[in-house]
Image (tube, rainbow, N blue to C red):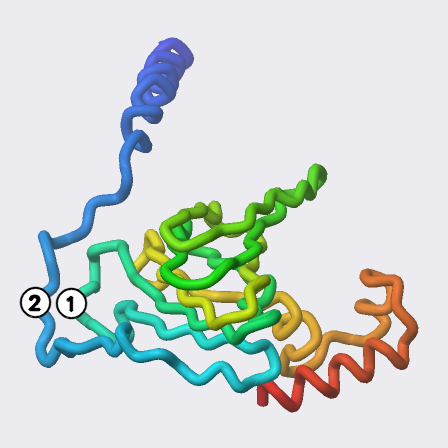
Amino acid sequence: MKTAHFILVFCLLALASPFAYASDPSPLQDFCVAINDPKDAGLNIPRNTSNPVGSTVTPVNVAQIPGLNTLGISLVRIDYAPNGGLNPPHTHPRATEILVVVEGTLYVGFVTSNTDNRLITKVLYPGDVFVFPIGLIHFQFNVGKTNAVAFAALSSQNPGVITVANAVFGSNPPINPDVLVKAFQLDKNVVKNLQSKFWWANN
């Protein structure tokens, strides 16, 4: 009798579980009324791109606007220097991103997950959009001779960002060089040089 009862309960739970996971988690409130939300996020102001990668990201997420808490959305403005301004390969562990180009010409792309590792790319012009799926490594590169500007919406109030080169070569403490030598099939001196370059930039 106990076995039949257990099987019946198990079957009911198995049938009910797809319904329990069929929707996004609900926030605990309709919205967050935050004090001192900035009225001007500064997204209309061009940013300085005089840095090693030639780009600057201006975020508007829950850290800048607490009222975004529980709403599951954020925004960034990205300014790119002419002739190669780069938003380097990175990933957002908690968000899908949709990017729209406002000025300039961008070569954009993402890499699918293992084992395929297929590169999906496109050249974008003003008004074009491109979607970067959650968690996948992606980039944007200014192939034009003028400044470029893009805006991106992300499906999280706090999407997170992991810049691949910074994370791998600039971690604190550093990853054992032997691990990186084997993983990237590089000479140990090259790995140590990259680690010193990225570690000092990040710390």
The answer to whether the residues at label 1 and label 2 have Cβ atoms under 8 Å apart is: yes
Q: Amino acid at mark 1?
A: Gly
Q: Amino acid at mark 2?
A: Val
Evaluate whether residue 125 shows in this view.
Answer: yes
Question: Label for residue 67?
Answer: 1
Is 59 on the left or on the right of 201, as rendered?
A: left
The residue drawn where x is 86% and y is 72% is 178
The x, y position of residue 37, in whole percent, is 13, 76
**SS at mark 2 in the image:** loop
Q: Residue 33: which disc?
A: 2
Where does residue 35 sit, x and y in percent of width and height? 9, 77
Q: Is residue 57 above or below residue 7?
A: below
Residue 145 image point, x, y percent: 56, 69
Residue lying furthest front in this view? 145
Residues 78 and 106: in front is: 106
Numbered circle sitting on residue 36: none
In this rendering, the answer to whether 6 lies above or below 197 is above
Establish if 1 lies above or below 137.
above
Give coordinates of residue 71: x percent, y percent. Answer: 21, 55
Mark 1 or mark 2: whose residue is earlier in sequence: 2
- In the foreground, 32 or 129: 129
Q: Nearer the viewer, residue 121 or 26?
A: 121
* Residue at horizontal 86 percent and vertical 68 percent from the top: 181
Give the class, few, some or many, for how many residues have Cα within 10 Å of label 1's Cα (few <14, many ≥20): some
Q: Residue at x 59, y 46 (%)?
A: 121
Picture quadrant where residue 75 is located: bottom left
When asked about the image quadrant of residue 26, the answer is top left
Give the distance between the C-alpha atoms of the residues marked 1 and 2, in whole angstroms: 6 Å
Horizontally, residue 114 falls left or right of residue 15, namely: right
The answer to whether any part of residue 95 appears in the image is: no
The quarter of the displayed image where residue 162 is located: bottom right
